[in-house]
Image (cartoon, rainbow, N blue to C red):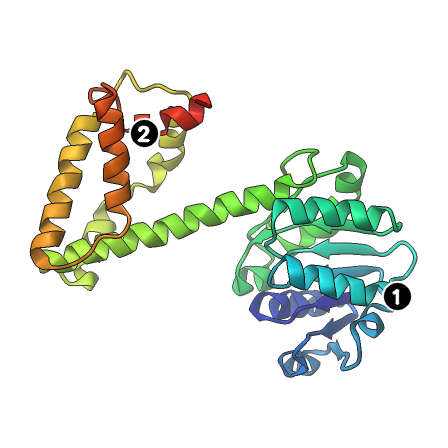
């Protein structure tokens, strides 16, 4: 028996994926109306307390909002935990919270594994995407075969129990940064009288994606003395962007902070370095 706690979009998709594989699945949600539709897929919807939902389950999977929700639901579920239960937490939480929960439940003979995901509902249904794990080597080896059928890839990010949570935050920052950069790009497009739909013309032909990892490698290896786009010229271009946005009456939210950082580095005499030198202090730990 598998119990799924938290039936939002992703949690519901995980439940349906388990059911399609022939697993017996119980579901529970704090707002029970969000769990009831899963009965049509064959899930057992538990309308009582969460301890009832986990009673006798070999595996419990959580997909909840935050640390507070995870802690409160686990505390309420604990009286129903079967001996040897495996608890998989797919929620995006703080690294400290994940580490504290791992230690807390280990002391109570419960194996708690924080296993955050880079998956949407469709990915969960199709068993692709990525699950992150970290922590005790024996535990990771034990649970990886159970997690692998849920996804296209299980990535072990090391023995420190908080690293899966940390890597999840790093990945989400990349996604948020994309969205913020796109918002600035659309603001600049509007300022220059280019319709948002027309920006696709550029993206249909200009795909910076393949250079993404290469650029990050350049940054982390601190190879700033062989510029492909020097900082001074990049700052000049940022100035052109800001001027066009100002002229068109559209506010850029990301670029001003980046331009200020560029100015700081140029003032330190780094204008002829590759523009990625903006990360120099972070790479060198200064």
Can you see residue 68? Answer: yes
| Marked residue nearer the N-terminal end (1 or 2) | 1
Secondary structure beneath disc 1?
A: helix
For image coordinates 61% across by 59% down, the residue present is 66
Tag 2 secondary structure: helix
> In which quadrant will I find the N terminus?
bottom right
User: Residue 117, image x and y in percent?
Assistant: 59, 52
At 59% from the left and 61% from the top, the residue drawn is 124
On-image quarter of the C terminus: top left
- Is 250 located above or below residue 111 in the figure? below
Residue at coordinates 80% horizontally, 76% vertically from top-left? Answer: 49
Query: Which is nearer the eye, 99 or 89?
Result: 99
Q: Is residue 155 visible?
A: no
99 relative position to 126: left or right: right
Residue 244, horizontal then vertical, whole percent: 10, 50
Decide if residue 57 is on the left or right side of residue 189.
right
Q: Which residue is mark 1?
A: 79
Residue with the most extreme left position: 247
- Marks 1 and 2, how far apart at CA: 52 Å
Name the one closer to the observer, 153 or 54. Answer: 54
x and y percentages locating residue 100 in the rendered image: 73, 46
Total marks placed:
2
Quadrant in the picture for residue 83: bottom right
Query: Is 156 situated above or below 100?
Result: above
Number of the label disc, if any, that sits on residue 61 = none
Q: Residue at x 32, y 29 (%)?
A: 278
The label number, if any, that marks residue 278 in the structure image: 2
């Amino acid at each position: 028996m598998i119990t799924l706690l938290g039936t939002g979009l992703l949690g519901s998709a995980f439940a349906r994926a388990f059911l399609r594989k022939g697993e017996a699945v119980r579901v529970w949600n704090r707002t029970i109306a969000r769990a009831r539709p899963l009965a049509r897929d064959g899930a057992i919807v538990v309308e009582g307390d969460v301890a009832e939902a986990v009673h006798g389950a070999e595996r419990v999977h959580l997909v909840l909002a935050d640390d507070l929700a995870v802690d409160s639901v686990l505390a309420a579920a604990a009286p129903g935990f079967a001996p040897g239960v495996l608890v998989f937490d797919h929620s995006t939480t703080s690294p400290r919270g994940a580490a504290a929960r791992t230690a807390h439940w280990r002391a109570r003979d419960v194996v708690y594994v924080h296993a955050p995901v880079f998956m949407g509902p469709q990915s969960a249904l199709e068993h692709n995407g990525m699950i992150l794990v970290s922590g005790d080597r024996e535990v990771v080896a034990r649970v990886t075969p159970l997690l692998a059928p849920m996804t296209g890839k299980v990535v072990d990010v090391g023995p420190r129990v908080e690293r899966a949570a940390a890597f999840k935050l790093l990945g989400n920052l990349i996604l948020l940064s994309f969205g913020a950069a796109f918002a600035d790009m659309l603001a600049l497009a509007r300022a220059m009288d280019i319709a948002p739909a027309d920006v696709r013309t550029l993206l249909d032909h200009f795909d910076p994606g393949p250079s993404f990892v290469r650029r990050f490698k350049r940054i982390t290896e601190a190879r700033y003395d062989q510029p492909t786009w020097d900082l001074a010229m990049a700052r000049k271009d940022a100035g052109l962007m800001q001027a066009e946005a100002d002229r068109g009456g559209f506010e850029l939210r990301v670029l001003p902070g980046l331009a200020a950082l560029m100015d700081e580095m140029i003032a330190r005499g780094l204008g002829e370095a590759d523009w990625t030198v903006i990360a120099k202090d972070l790479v060198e730990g200064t």
